[in-house]
Image (cartoon, rainbow, N blue to C red):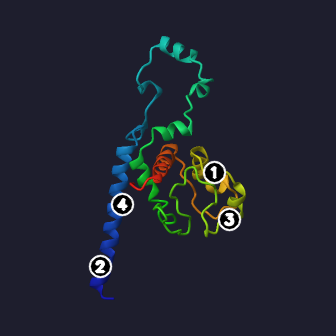
Amino acid sequence: MSAFELNKVAGAVLFAALVAMIAYIAAKNVFDSHTVGHDVFSANDHYPVPGNMLNEIEEIDLSNKEEEAIEVSFLDLVSTAGIESGKKVFKKCAACHTIDSNGANKAGPNLWKIVGRQVASIDGFGYSEALKSLGGIWDVERLGAFLLNPKEYVPGTKMGFSGIKKDRKRADLVRFLITLDTESK
């Protein structure tokens, strides 16, 4: 390597170090709002709260706030869910499932008319023994629970999907699946 090439490499390293140092200093000044220079704010540097307001704040009972939260059922979420949003969520499922009438099975079974259908009922699809033994029908609440965490809902299922954790997205998906009982999607 020639001296010119060594100078270019050394210059690039120094330039990168200079950029990193400037970025560090700028970020520290922008995001470190609790210090001015090296002096830490004292307790008197905050917005003053009148003494009588502090007494009122202490009297508030926060012990039962969790119990007062209104819990919405999954069925209620599905009733107000968005079909178009569910169609977008289904893109995660499309790698393994089809949704066409008489559609082919992929890694997972066809989901045409899944809501109201018997569990593990598509002829020719190799369901896991765990899913076969589940029995019953796929109703809205059961689909919601399964889609939250398939491996927890049906231990031993072959479905490798980790689930949809957000209730709203899961409700949108189930609402979309409900619409798959007509030829017009």
Q: Which residue is mark 1?
A: 137
Name the kind of residue labelled 3 in the image.
Ser
Q: CA distance from mark 1 to mark 4?
A: 59 Å
Q: Earlier in the sequence, mark 2 or mark 3?
A: 2
Few, some or many residues within 10 Å of mark 4 (<14, 14–19, 20+)? few
Q: Earlier in the sequence, mark 1 or mark 4?
A: 4
Residue furthest out toward the top: 52
Q: Nearer the viewer, residue 180 or 46?
A: 180
The residue under the point 35% across, 45% down is: 29
Q: Earlier in the sequence, mark 4 or mark 2?
A: 2
Name the kind of residue labelled 1 in the image.
Ile
**Snapshot quadrant of residue 10:** bottom left
Front of the two marks 1 and 3? 1
Q: Which residue is mark 2?
A: 7
Q: Nearer the viewer, residue 135 or 32?
A: 135
Q: Which residue is mark 4?
A: 20
Front of the two marks 3 and 4? 3
Name the kind of residue labelled 2 in the image.
Asn
> Which numbered marker is on residue 128?
3
Name the kind of residue labelled 4 in the image.
Ala
